[in-house]
Amino acid sequence: MAEDKAPAKKSTWVNLVVDYGPIVLFFIVYKYYAPKAGQASLGEVTAVIAGTVAFMIAAVAALGFSLWKFRKVSPMLWLSTALIVVFGGLTVLLQDQFYIQIKPTAIYLLFGLALIGGWLKGRALLKILLEAAFEGLDDDGWMILSRNWGFFFLALAALNEGLRYYLSFAGWLQAKLWLFLPLSFLFTFVHMPMLLRHGLAHSAEDEVVTHPPHE
């Protein structure tokens, strides 16, 4: 009897498409439908709804592709996709952009508090959420990574709330692309020396280390 195939290994570009494709598509669709200067505010609602629908479809498609391609999906991707569908559905149903803006805060708080709570109890929950993303990383490395990402997620939640309060929806959306993503990449790659010290396999060096849950 033929042996079952092991789950395929993700490549860097596939990681990027799965993690950030939905939010990029949201931005593109929103910009396409966004009202021009002098148009009625109803156009803003239409743009948000259209972008949200595209966002939800793309998020579910990314989850399905990941499941088909790699035969398994990390708990982090399952949970973040579920929250996208829930908050996106509320946005469409109530026609209120508040829910699409508050969703990242909810996701960041959920993961941040969970990771810090696990760290305080001596459990590296990030290892469970990301599964085999860091081949060879020892327990101390996972603990450090869980703690640091936990606090980083809480910082992102606070930042999202500040930007949501002070910026227009369009400004907030721009910040999601041009502020949150670079911060996440920077935070990821400054951990590379620590990860290598704690046993990260050399074969994993060329892979994207980790990403926050797609939003």
Image (tube, grey):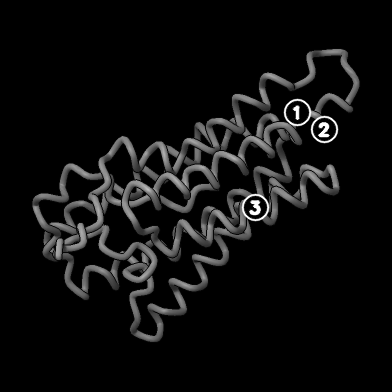
Tell me if mark 2 has few (under 14), some (14-19) or many (20+) residues whose alpha carbon lies within 10 angstroms of its own: many
Q: Quadrant of residue 3?
A: bottom left
Residue found 65% across the figure and 43% down from its top? 163
Closest to the observer, 136 or 180: 136
CB under 8 Å between callouts 3 and 1?
no
Q: CA distance from mark 3 to mark 2?
A: 18 Å
Q: Vertical placement of 95 versus 106: above or below?
A: above
Q: Amino acid at mark 3?
A: Val
Q: Amino acid at mark 2?
A: Val
Residue 45 shows which numbered tag?
2
Q: CA distance from mark 2 to mark 1?
A: 5 Å
| Label 1 sits on residue | 47
Percent from the top left, x then y, of residue 28? 60, 24
Q: Amino acid at mark 1?
A: Ala
CB under 8 Å between callouts 2 and 1?
yes
Residue 184 shows which numbered tag?
none
Residue found 25% across the figure and 56% down from its top? 7
Which label's residue is closer to the chain start, 3 or 1? 1
Residue found 43% across the figure and 64% down from its top? 75
Looking at the image, is mark 3 or mark 2 nearer the viewer? 3
Percent from the top left, x then y, of residue 45? 82, 32
Closest to the observer, 64 or 200: 64
Tell me: 178 left or right of 54: left
What is the secondary structure assignment of the residue under circle 3?
helix
| Label 3 sits on residue | 85
Tell me if mark 1 has few (under 14), some (14-19) or many (20+) residues whose alpha carbon lies within 10 angstroms of its own: many
Tell me: 110 left or right of 97: left
Percent from the top left, x then y, of residue 44? 81, 28
